[in-house]
Image (cartoon, grey):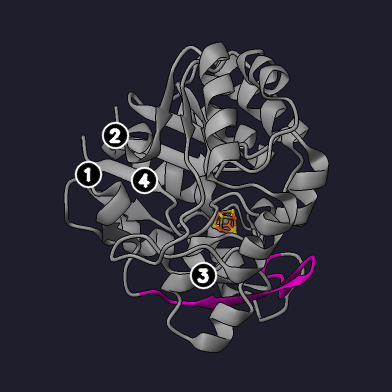
Amino acid sequence: MTDRQLALFTAGDGDAETRPDRVGHASVTYRGAGSILTRASGFIGDYDFTLNPYSGCTFACTYCYAAFFVRDRALQDSWGDWVQVKDNALEMLRRMRTPLAGKRIYMSSVTDPYQPVERQLRLVRDLLEALIPQQPRLVVQTRSPLVTRDIDLYRRFSHVRINMTVTTDSERVRRAFEPHCPSTRARLSAIRQVTDAGLPTCVTMTPLLPVEDPAAFARALRDTGVRRFVVQPFHVEKGRFVAGTRDQAKQIVDEMGWDHEAYERAVDALRRHLPHLDEGRAGFAPD
Ligand code: SF4
């Protein structure tokens, strides 16, 4: 464990420097987790493992399906207002006996690894440093410009892809569905930096929210240099593998008149302007 990590995880509760107990609107708690790598299944069953350094996510998207995987009803209801740090994550990763060379790891499936608390904790950065000697095939899913901080580490992986979630061209729409998330402009700028650094990238429009000008949106997406795109509608049904969209988001969707036909029209327009647009699970497959 690095000196910085030791400081992080042995300091007293509420030490604002190393163990913040709040970040923005949300509470931060620390707990030991039973595992750091989980066998992948369902929608991302093409991977070997998922890696979630945190439980909960303070980006608090109104449509977040991950809320349904929380067993505690109170935590489910307050999704977005809390994050739990897996403070033994690095230790668990280092102690794993399973060889990870060539294994396909998806980070993260039920949290955003680069949510705001990561800026102080740098837990993801420590995990990446621990993974580099093992050289797994890594796909990182985020909507945070903070991912650019770790470009130097990603360049040391032989197989890595950064997926940036971008859901709409409209800040009005983005604020309605994702009030605590980075702006679309910031996300596009970040994925451009990652692409310019020579790393494989993808923009995931998952879910695609109401789009004001699909052609201009497609141009802005292409201008990032990214050449791989994925689109997906809301999951409106609760199913065996896919949890349903939250009621708050369904209400906004109805208010904005974003139905299946509107989604299909927008996808058709995007398809005309983007070089490679997958839909659904196929777009998330590892390379
Ligand atoms: S960033 Fe992802 S995990 Fe976090 S609240 Fe939004 S959809 Fe959920």
Q: Tags 1 and 2 in contact by the CB under 8 Å rule?
A: yes
Instruction: Examine the image and state in which quarter residue 42 appears.
Output: bottom left
Q: How far is the residue under mark 4 from the one under mark 3?
A: 18 Å
Q: Secondary structure at mark 3?
A: helix
Give the label, 2 or 4, closer to the camera: 4
Find out whether residue 184 is within the magenta segment: no
Residue farthest along the front direction in this orientation: 261
Could you say which is closer to the camera, residue 256 or residue 131? Answer: 256
Earlier sequence position, callout 4 versus callout 3: 3
Which stretch is magenta? 18-33
Q: Which residue is mark 2?
A: 135
Instruction: Examine the image and state in which quarter residue 7 appears.
Output: bottom right
Q: Which residue is mark 3?
A: 67
Please give left or right for residue 65 compared with residue 46 in the image.
Answer: right
- The image shows residue 215, relative to residue 43, as above or below, that is above
Earlier sequence position, callout 3 versus callout 2: 3
Q: How far is the residue under mark 3 from the one under mark 1?
A: 29 Å
Give the label, 4 or 1, closer to the camera: 4
Res 116 seen here: no
Q: Ligand 1 near label 4 (Cβ, under 8 Å)?
A: no
